[in-house]
Image: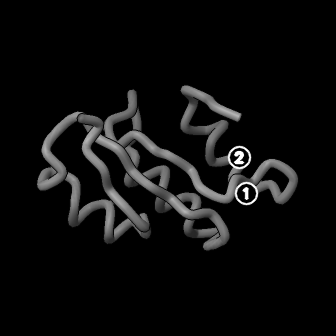
Amino acid sequence: WSTGSPAVAIEHCHNAHTRPDVLVLDMALGGITGADVCRRIRRRTSEVGIVCVTSYSTDVYRAEAIAAGAQGLLAKE
């Protein structure tokens, strides 16, 4: 599945029937950050691998992604 909605992504990650093995998560979302989405998923499950992506320098988000529980951070380039 794919979605542009952070709420839908969180819901799918918390549901055993729709939970992905890995979630590719943009760090800059409208209204909520990728780190916030990651934290919300991590509060209920550690079963989803989370790889964050950004069009900005990875230096901008590195510490935040790690603190939120992501396994990786990649530049979109």
Vertical position of residue 9 compared to residue 58: above or below = above
- What is the x, y in percent for residue 39? 47, 62
Other residues around mark 2 within 10 Å, as few (<14) / some (14–19) / many (≥20): some
Task: State the separation of the CA atoms marked 2 and 1.
Answer: 5 Å
In the depicted view, which residue is nearer to us: 38 or 76?
76
* Residue that sits furthest to the front in the current view: 77
Q: Which mark is residue 27?
A: none
Residue drawn at 80 percent across, 48 percent down: 18
> In which quadrant of the rendered image does the C terminus lie?
top left
Vertical position of residue 42 compared to residue 77: above or below = below
Q: Which mark is residue 14?
A: 1
Task: Decide if residue 38 is on the left or right side of residue 16.
Answer: left
Amino acid type at mark 2? Glu
* Residue that sits furthest to the right in the current view: 17
Residue drawn at 32 percent across, 56 percent down: 73
Residue drawn at 67 percent across, 59 percent down: 21
In the depicted view, which residue is nearer to us: 75 or 18?
75
- What is the x, y in percent for residue 37? 49, 50
Other residues around mark 1 within 10 Å, as few (<14) / some (14–19) / many (≥20): many
Task: Decide if residue 60 is on the left or right side of residue 30.
Answer: left
In the depicted view, which residue is nearer to us: 61 or 51?
51
Amino acid type at mark 1? His
- What is the x, y in percent for residue 24? 50, 46
What secondary structure is found at the residue carrying circle 2? Answer: helix
Q: Are marks 2 and 1 in contact (CB under 8 Å)?
A: yes
Write down the residue under mark 2.
11
> In which quadrant of the rendered image does the N terminus lie?
top right
